[in-house]
């Protein structure tokens, strides 16, 4: 959402909490549910872990949450070969 709608987010000073995608890096298997996929379990676990922190986010801020940490969100940029890398 922050990458696709930056003007709207800035105009309304929207507060956004994003979840680091499950498949961005190699992760240990999750123990859990027979029906839910790992990525769904991941989203639920991260959301549950950080829900109070997300609710207290400063207005207009955009954060990315992971199982272990949270950090300011940065846009993905593609290099000429089409591979993603993060801005610093």
Image (cartoon, helix red, strand yellow):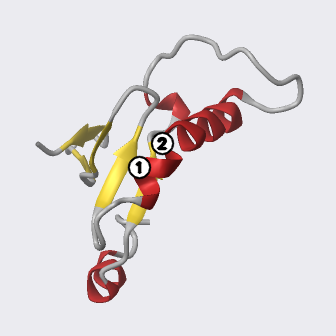
The image position of residue 55, as x and y in percent, is 45, 59
Q: Nearer the viewer, residue 34 or 59?
A: 59
Give me the residue at 64% from left, 34% from top. Answer: 39
Element assignment for label 2: helix
Q: Residue furthest right?
A: 35
Verify CB contact (< 8 Å) between mark 2 and mark 1: yes
- Above or below, 8 relative to 68: below
Q: CA distance from mark 2 to mark 1?
A: 5 Å
- How many numbered callouts? 2
The image position of residue 79, as x and y in percent, is 20, 43
Determine whether, in the image, residue 9 is placed left or right of residue 31.
left
Q: Residue furthest top?
A: 28
Determine whether, in the image, residue 39 is placed left or right of residue 1.
right
The image position of residue 44, as x and y in percent, is 65, 40
Q: Quadrant of residue 38?
A: top right
Determine whether, in the image, residue 21 is placed left or right of residue 6.
right
Q: Which mark is residue 39?
A: none
Give me the residue at 29% from left, 83% from top. Answer: 7
Q: Residue furthest bottom?
A: 11
CA neighbours of label 1 inside 10 A, class few (<14), some (14 to 19), many (20+): few
CA neighbours of label 2 inside 10 A, class few (<14), some (14 to 19), many (20+): some
Q: Which mark is residue 50?
A: 2
The quarter in which the C terminus is drawn is top left
Kindly identify which residue carries mark 1: 53
Q: Nearer the viewer, residue 82 or 68?
A: 68
Give me the residue at 28% from left, 73% from top. Answer: 60
Element assignment for label 1: helix
Give me the residue at 55% from left, 11% from top. Answer: 28
């Amino acid at each position: 959402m922050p990458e696709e709608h930056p003007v709207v987010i800035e105009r309304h000073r929207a507060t956004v909490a994003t979840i680091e995608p499950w498949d961005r890096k190699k992760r240990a298997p999750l123990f859990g549910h027979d029906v839910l996929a790992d990525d769904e379990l991941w989203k639920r676990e991260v959301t549950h872990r950080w829900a109070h922190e997300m609710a207290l986010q400063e207005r207009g801020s955009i954060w990315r949450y992971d199982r272990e940490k949270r950090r300011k969100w940065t846009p993905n940029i593609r290099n000429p070969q089409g591979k993603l890398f993060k801005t610093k």
